[in-house]
Image (tube, rainbow, N blue to C red):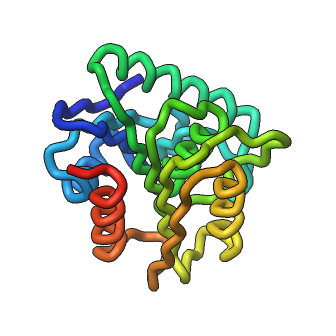
Amino acid sequence: MKHRFEPGTSPTLLLLHGTGGDENDLIPLGQLIRPGAAMLSPRGEVDENGQLRFFRRLAPGVFDEADLVHRTHQLADFVEDQSERHHFRKIVAVGYSNGANIAASMLLLRPGLLSGAILLRAMVPLELAHPPDLAGLPVLILAGRHDEMMSPDQPQRLAALLLGAGADVTLEWQDTGHGLGPMDVKTAKEWMDANFAP
């Protein structure tokens, strides 16, 4: 899997870009959230009309669940391999949009791999009959009040799903749309400092 790795301090930030991004997109965000942190930033391998994604969708907001499950495990295997190679102690996912959705899917399908997650503009990736045990796992969901890419109940549903699995979920609303703004960075950095002491 094509990726960018920047060595640094723990926890390692797993940076997962949005549709149309690549492995360079979230490096500046990672540097702002946790200066000096190690960063692992893979490139999505699904090409949707020339735009890279981490998994296929059938229509906007409608995910190809079989592909999502397959690619979630594929990404998790890659992260595990990199973790062994570089001796990561803790991994915190920082995902935006499509990247946030596969990060949420990793929490549900591969519990124990991530030590926490910052989910920026995330939706419910899939519904599980038996959610995993995510007891005490810190998760920050940053949602936009005017997000044109999803229905407004999606962030609440995702928060409820993760809370039901035992995660320590913080849902914060920003007065913005699908794009990211300065308050996202400020909130994410404060959450990181509170949950993963520098």
Q: Nearer the viewer, residue 54 or 39?
A: 39
Q: How many marks?
A: 0
Q: Is residue 59 visible?
A: no
Q: Is 124 displayed left or right of 89 in the figure?
A: right
Q: Is residue 30 above or below residue 7?
A: below
Residue extending furthest toward the right: 129
Residue extending furthest toward the bottom: 175
Q: Is 157 displayed left or right of 146 in the figure?
A: right
Residue 172 at x, y = what percent?
49, 73
Measuring 60% from the left and 45% from the top, which residue is drawn there? 135
Measuring 48% from the left and 52% from the top, which residue is drawn there? 138
Q: Is residue 116 above or below residue 114?
A: below
- Quarter of the rendering occupied by the N terminus: top left
Measuring 54% from the left and 31% from the top, which residue is drawn there? 112
Q: Is 123 displayed left or right of 75 in the figure?
A: right
Residue 85 at x, y = what percent?
31, 14
Q: Is residue 89 visible?
A: yes
Q: Is residue 92 above or below residue 187?
A: above
Corner quadrant of residue 62? bottom right
Q: Nearer the viewer, residue 45 or 14?
A: 14
Residue 57 at x, y = what percent?
68, 46
Measuring 63% from the left and 59% from the top, which residue is drawn there? 123
Q: Is 13 displayed left or right of 35 in the figure?
A: right
Residue 9 at x, y = what percent?
19, 37
Residue extending furthest toward the front: 136
